[in-house]
């Protein structure tokens, strides 16, 4: 094999996974030009166009699709060999590629990740804190931290490591002015601040004697940031419905007050998800073990 051929294949696979030469270059520590030249060399060698290039995205040609899966598997096999050798040394190595929801990641994954990197100085981490759903296999991530029930996927393994609890709360000032709702149905006459994750605000869930109750009324204020929702509630704008990993400190301090506690819905699982390879690499295993140990006492949520 020519000296630079493996590097060219790595650049091609990264470009497909990330969807652009620029993103692939960033993930590999190369320039965009270097990634483009690698793909061009592969196309010249195979005498076939592998990628359709537009100003907005890359897409595989039929020929590109035929070689992508094989080359991806070859690179994963090489990583597995390295992981096996690292396991024999007892030292995680390489780069951990991790994704987690934005607010949760910043508040609760980042501290664990900092401890992880201090514990293993030879490791690097590439992190995406985003509320966008990321396909681990297609985009080349080692592990995701996800909240809620899992999707069926034979290519992925999942492990529940903690839970999150949604609570409805508001500032004492707001409740003094507008009153305290006694039932979920009372929310219809209150000012609510809702999370806008898509076209519609996310529903608020409650457990009642009659069963699950969904409050789907659009909020008086709809925001696409849970951190901004918290700030709005602290300022007295209205009620919010957020996990205690965001509001816990404010609730303990009395800056926010929980309402409708008897109607809390069951907590949601917080899961680590990772590709189902034959051998779990030491860097993934070490991070999961550290996550479980860090949250053994019930963190990141408190009742």
Image: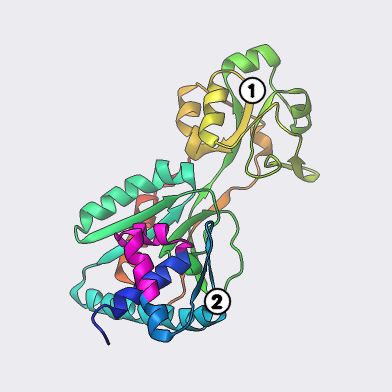
Left-right relation of 266 to 157? right
Q: Looking at the image, which residue is at 30% across and 80% down? A: 5
Crowd rating for badge 2 (residues with CA inside 10 Å; few <14, some 14–19, many 20+): some
Q: Which mark is residue 238?
A: 1
Identify whether 191 is placed above or below 144: above
Of the two numbered discs 2 and 1 on the same chain, state the one appearing first in sequence: 2
The residue at the point 58 percent across, 54 percent down is 148
Snapshot quadrant of residue 190 = top right
Along the line of sight, the residue nearer the viewer: 105 or 14: 14
Q: Quadrant of the N terminus?
A: bottom left
Relative depth, front residue between 181 and 137 = 137
Q: Which residues are magenta?
A: 18-40
**Front residue of 121 and 285:** 121
| Left or right of 168, for residue 72 | left
Magenta region, main secondary structure: helix
Residue 204, quarter of picture? top right
Q: Which residue is mark 2?
A: 61
Q: Is residue 140 left or right of residue 209?
A: left
Q: Nearer the viewer, mark 2 or mark 1?
A: 2
Residue 213 in magenta stretch: no
Q: Position of residue 232 (x, y in %)?
A: 56, 24
* Colour convention of the picture: rainbow
Relative to 30, say whether 182 is above or below: above
Q: Residues within 10 Å of mark 1 (few under 14, many from 20)?
A: many
């Amino acid at each position: 094999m020519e000296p630079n051929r493996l590097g060219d294949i790595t650049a091609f696979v990264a470009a497909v996974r990330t969807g652009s030469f620029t993103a692939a270059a960033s993930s590999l520590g190369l320039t965009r030009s270097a990634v483009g030249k690698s793909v061009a060399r592969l196309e010249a060698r195979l005498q076939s166009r592998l990628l359709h290039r537009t100003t907005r995205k890359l897409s595989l040609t039929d020929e590109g699709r035929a070689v992508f899966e094989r080359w991806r598997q070859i690179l994963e096999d090489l990583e597995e060999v390295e992981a096996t050798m690292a396991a024999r040394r007892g030292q995680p190595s390489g780069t951990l590629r991790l994704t987690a929801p934005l607010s949760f990641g910043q508040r609760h994954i980042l501290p664990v990740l900092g401890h992880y990197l201090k514990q293993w100085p030879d490791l690097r981490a590439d992190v995406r804190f985003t509320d966008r759903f990321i396909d681990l296999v297609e985009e080349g991530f080692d592990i995701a931290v996800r909240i809620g029930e899992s999707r069926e996927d034979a290519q992925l393994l999942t492990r529940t490591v903690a839970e999150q609890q949604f609570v409805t709360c508001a500032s004492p000032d707001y409740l003094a002015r507008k009153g305290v709702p006694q039932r979920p149905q009372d929310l219809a006459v209150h000012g609510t601040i809702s999370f806008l994750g898509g076209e519609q605000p996310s529903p608020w869930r409650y457990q009642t004697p009659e069963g699950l109750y969904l409050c789907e009324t659009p909020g008086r204020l709809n925001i696409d940031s849970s951190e901004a929702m918290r700030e709005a509630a602290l300022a007295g704008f209205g009620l919010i419905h957020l996990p205690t990993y965001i509001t816990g400190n404010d609730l303990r301090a009395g800056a926010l007050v929980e309402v409708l506690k008897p109607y809390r819905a069951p907590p949601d699982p917080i899961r680590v998800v990772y590709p189902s390879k034959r051998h779990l690499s030491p860097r993934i295993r070490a991070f999961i073990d550290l996550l479980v140990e860090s949250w053994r006492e019930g963190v990141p949520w408190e009742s």
